[in-house]
Amino acid sequence: MNKLAVLLSIVSLLAFTSPVLAQSQRGVAARQAQADNNTNRNQRISEVLDRIIDKATTRYQRYEEFIGKLESRRARLAETGVDVTELDNSIRLSKSALGNVRGTINTAKETFANLDLSQNPGEIRRQVVAEITNIRQAFRELHRSVANAVAIASRLSN
Amino acid sequence: MARRSTQKSEFNILLPSLALSALVFLLAIAVATGVRQPQQVVVSADNDTYLSESDDIESLENDLLLLESDNLLEEQTILQNIQ
């Protein structure tokens, strides 16, 4: 009789604990899947941000090269006796704008590196968009200034 | 037996022509394959050497357009990436 009581106790204990254990295992699996998803998502975000910085750096280098060509043009004009003061000022402004672009890229790079990817996606997006807007604005100013320098060089060349 | 011998001599006469035809055929395939190979891309969006080497005004103006196009393209790409 005692044996039967023990057996019944064990069976009832198993009957109660099995669903709890199964649920617990499902919970662990779900948490693992969620962690994997987060890791993949963070990796994708990091890749996109790295690409943004790389592309911006390449564009920066192209403008740097372009300003070098403007300086070369300026030297040729000066050799022919043309007054290049206005062009000098314009090139100086272009170089300053170029430095500003470099600054915004560096700031964005630092912000992206320190970005807490576990936070709310809306907040991540807000910070990323803010940095991209700064870079875009700096490039627009740089482009305006080099376009102005080219217009001056064109006028002096005629 | 005589017919077989005639066929063999005809084959021997035709053999150089057949070999030449095969060679020409193989050459034609080689040329066609060579032509179909993709040409190397000289200018790409990621290449930082697309600016011309000249500092002539016309080159500067053309390069300015390329830079502006590149900016617009890049802005569009970024917008698509972050949406």
Image: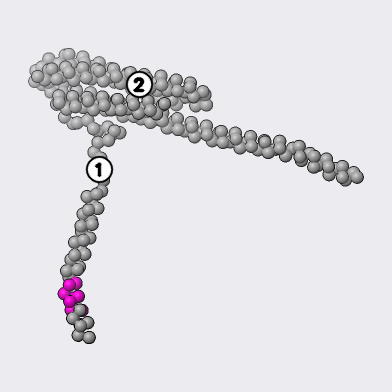
- Residue A17's x, y, as percent? 74, 37
Highlighted magenta segment, given as a residue range: B8-15
Quadrant where the C terminus of chain B sits is top left
Are the residues at dot 2 and dot 1 in contact (C-beta closer than 8 Å)?
Answer: no
Quadrant where the N terminus of chain B sits is bottom left
Residue behind mark 1:
B40
Image position of A15 (left or right of A61): right
Colour setup of the view: one colour
* Element marked by disc 1: loop
Quarter of the image holding residue A62? top left
Residue behind mark 2:
A135
Q: Is residue B9 magenta?
A: yes
Asked if residue A68 can be seen in this view, the reply is: no
Quarter of the image holding residue A99? top left
Residue at 21%, 27% in the rendered image: B63
* Element marked by disc 2: helix
Gap in angstroms between the C-alphas marked 2 and 1: 32 Å
Q: Please tell me if label 2 and label 1 are on a single chain.
A: no
